[in-house]
Image (tube, rainbow, N blue to C red):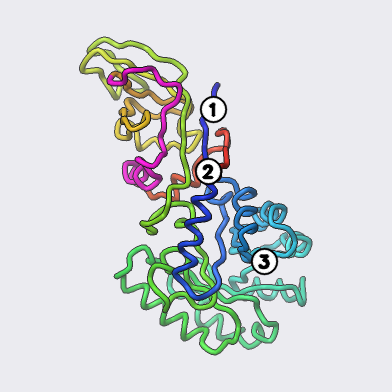
Amino acid sequence: MATGRLTIDLSALLSNWRSLDAMTACETGAVVKANAYGLGSGRVAAALAGMGVAKFFVATVEEGRRVRESVGPEKDIHVFSGHMQGDTEAILQLNLIPMLNSVDQLTRHFEALPGHPFGIQLDTGMNRLGMEWAEWAAVASIAMQQRPRLIMSHLACADEPDHPMNEYQLGVFRKMTDGVGVPRSLSATGGILLGKDYHFDLTRPGIGMYGGMPFEQAKPVVHLDLPVIQVRDLTEGEVVGYGNSWQAKRASRIATVSGGYADGIIRSISNRAKFWHGSTPVPLVGRVSMDLITVDITDLEETPDYLSLLCPTQTVDDLAEIGGTIGYEILTSLGGRYQRRFIAS
């Protein structure tokens, strides 16, 4: 079966990073976890490193392995999940910086890799990862003697600028870290947009770099084209796809394109989303299935070879809104069957 073409505009991605970097007076790293939000961590990290980005963030040690292969030995790669049991050898060999999330992880790291770089992650109210206030107070003096490379926390509601949680977490972070004398980081994309009070010594842009909200000025990074496999003519009253969920109200031409929820095209956009042929929208009709999608191309003057699902006129956030989700899910769900093509526009 023919596969879709996923085009990643590295120039747009780097431009987005530079725009976010220009909003701060501190250092700017880059989050490349989840295979660089589904786009390909090797190529993305290498491009960022080539532009001078020195600090990268991944979710797991295995993600760190792929990024290390791409950026070389000199760049800092921080691992959000910290020092998990069984990760010691890889952390050492790959020279990764685990962000220690608990007393157990801190103990494991100091015993297994004394002197190896590490960071600290604190929980300032999100209740997800990191040491809570009492836990940090119990070990802070021991941790600081070993000089962590970075102390960080994560904002829960940064995509809502007026949410009171932002100011609350900022205050907690300051109380937990003021005077520590090591670099601090609180902000990803949303935090950068909140202003300088949230920037500290290092910011960690993720979604905004890849063209997603809440960075409204982001340039689109991703273009997804799906090949047309077959076109058929329907008479009024005929139905399409599983469950007969769409019925033709007129004589129609239906294109079957290669792609489906196995490729990260979520089923909730069924009968709601549009594809694009240049500047002309054409409706997705019927249910998104595992490998195939049907599109009503009756109003097109020509039979297309490809139809676009992600493009400047329908961004990841546009598609996410149609599907009742967020741009992060759209990006990170993009499947492995696509032909990934990297361009510099």
Q: Specify the label residue 180 is tagged with.
A: none
Residue plotted at (66% across, 54% down) = 67
Q: Specify the label residue 76 is tagged with.
A: 3
- Which tag, 1 or 2, sits closer to the chain's start? 1
**Amino acid type of the residue that numbered disc 1 sits on in the rendered structure:** Thr
Residue plotted at (51% across, 44% down) = 345
- Residues in magenta, as a range: 299-324
Q: In what element is the residue under mark 1?
A: loop
- Is residue 95 part of the magenta span, yes or no? no
Placement of 96 over or under 46, stated as above or below: below
Q: Assess disc 3: are there few (<14), some (14-19) or many (≥20) residues with their C-alpha within 10 Å of its C-alpha.
A: many
- Which tag, 3 or 1, sits closer to the chain's start? 1
- Which tag, 2 or 3, sits closer to the chain's start? 2
Name the foreground residue: 316 vs 330.
316
Name the foreground residue: 104 vs 45.
45
Where does label 1 land, which residue?
3
Residue plotted at (40% across, 45% down) = 316
Q: Could you give the CA–CA distance between mark 1 and mark 2, rounded to whole angstroms?
A: 16 Å
Which of the image's four quarters has the N terminus?
A: top right
**Amino acid type of the residue that numbered disc 2 sits on in the rendered structure:** Ile
Side of 335 relative to 164 (left or right): right
Where does label 2 land, which residue?
8
Placement of 202 over or under 134, stated as above or below: above
Q: Could you give the CA–CA distance between mark 2 and mark 3, rounded to whole angstroms?
A: 24 Å
- Determine whether label 2 and label 3 are within 8 Å by CB: no
